Amino acid sequence: MLARMLFQSWRHGLKRKLLAIITIFLAAGLVSALLAVSIDIGDKMARELKSYGANILVEPAGSAVLPQDISGNSALSTQDFLDEKELPNVKDIFWRNNIVGFAPLLSAEVDAVSARDNQPQRVSVLGTFFDRPIAVPDEDDYHTGQRIISPYWKVEGDWVDDSAEQINTPIPSLIGEQLAKTTGWKKGDHLTLTYQEDEFTGSIQVEIKGVLSTGGTEEQQLVIPLSAVQNLLDLDGKIQAIKVSALTVPENELSRKARANADALAAEEYDRWYCTAYVSSISHQLEEAISGAIVRPIWQVAASEGVVIEKIQLLLAVVTIAALIAAAMGIASLMTTGIIERSKEIGLMKALGAYQWQIVLLFYCEAVISALIGGALGCIAGWGLAKFIGTALFGSPLSFAWIVIPCVLVLSVLIALIGTWFPAHRIARLYPVEVLYGRQ
């Protein structure tokens, strides 16, 4: 009997049912797209926010200088260094796949003479990787450097190619924008760099390939391939620091507790912290992997990434809740109108002996069927919308997690039932005589 009544209801009230389906379809499509975006946006946004630069700094345990102080102003003979052979260990941790890239640093003050004017200048040089292949276990074609971890670097001219083991003379280099303005050097100029300490004197020839703009201390430096600076300073295989760019999750209470004192964590808390991609846990693992190193998160970058991602996810949650409320109100309005129009039918059913729960069940079943149809269509539309959002914002489509489908279907049914509850219970409490004689 219930099935026959549902069939007749859909047959004679198809237009109103279609309006309910469309209402749920729109809400379900938006909710499924937002859920898909929310699930995948963490990794996508983390990759996009790598434009802020590296978020972890590895230094010799003996020096432990601040990131902005790596300028080579102190005598090299008094400094501690890391071994360049330790670089592959950056990719030898639990969260190795979260390491976007890294770049070693070696800097010092040297004397520079331009072939154009022969005027000596005291300048700072920075040796680093630009885009260099590194032998890493289980990764045949791994390469890393500043072009990967510092996408905000802008070069007017040509990037330095340091992919080969041996770099021909003159050695290609980039000149910082501020240094270029101060010295008058420009692209194509040839420089002689000389470094002297105690009885050692080193000299190399470099050619400026481009002007570098970063907004940081690099704008006041000559940036040269690491191997050339090591030869100039007689520091073969030595580096001062490593900048690491890693994909991380936002900090929470557990990570802040571990940051204060990881040894104070209970065994279960420690395992959960260690196996979560917090910037603090990745830093801890890097410290375990690299001999004689102390690892510090660059909190200005790490904190900004977490705050941005949290705010975006909060915004998505607010929009999702608003869509659900709007859909529930739309369903309530449609069901109220439909039930009022069918008041005599309901009165007749009660006069013939129908129980209140049977009448309510009829309207709930109609709502659930509309919700399932609208929710299923909304999932398909949401999948397409999520792909479009991913392509428009990140240049690649977002992955659509299948867990979204049952979640959206359940939410669709819930908003349909919530929207139906008030009008269904209100009309079911009326007396048959009042309904049939038009008093209500």
Image (spheres, rainbow, N blue to C red):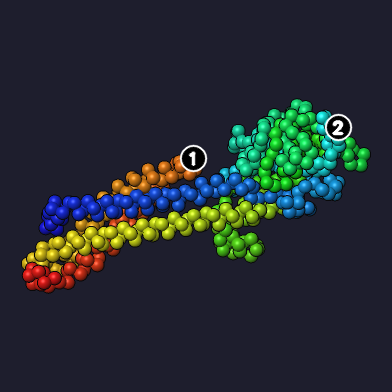
Dot 2: within a 10 Å radius of its alpha carbon, few (fewer than 14), some, or many (20 or more) residues?
Answer: few
Q: Say if 216 sits above or below 306 in the image.
A: above
Identify the residue shown where x is 72% and y is 40%.
176
Residue 89 visible here:
no
Q: Position of residue 307 (x, y in %)?
A: 55, 57
Question: What amino acid type is highlighted by mark number 1?
Answer: Gly
Q: Position of residue 66 (x, y in %)?
A: 73, 54
Label 1 secondary element: loop
If the image is split into quadrants, where does the N terminus sit? Answer: bottom left
Q: Earlier in the sequence, mark 1 or mark 2?
A: 2
Identify the residue shown where x is 48% and y is 44%.
393
Q: Say if 164 sits above or below 393 in the image.
A: above
Q: Which residue is mark 1?
A: 395
Q: Say if 356 sits above or below 70 in the image.
A: below
Identify the residue shown where x is 65% and y is 50%.
56
If the image is split into quadrants, where does the C terminus sit? Answer: bottom left
Question: What amino acid type is highlighted by mark number 2?
Answer: Asn
Q: Is residue 426 left or right of residue 326?
A: left
- Label count reads 2
Q: Which residue is mark 2?
A: 118
Q: Nearer the viewer, residue 216 or 416?
A: 216
Quadrant position of residue 188: top right
Label 2 secondary element: loop
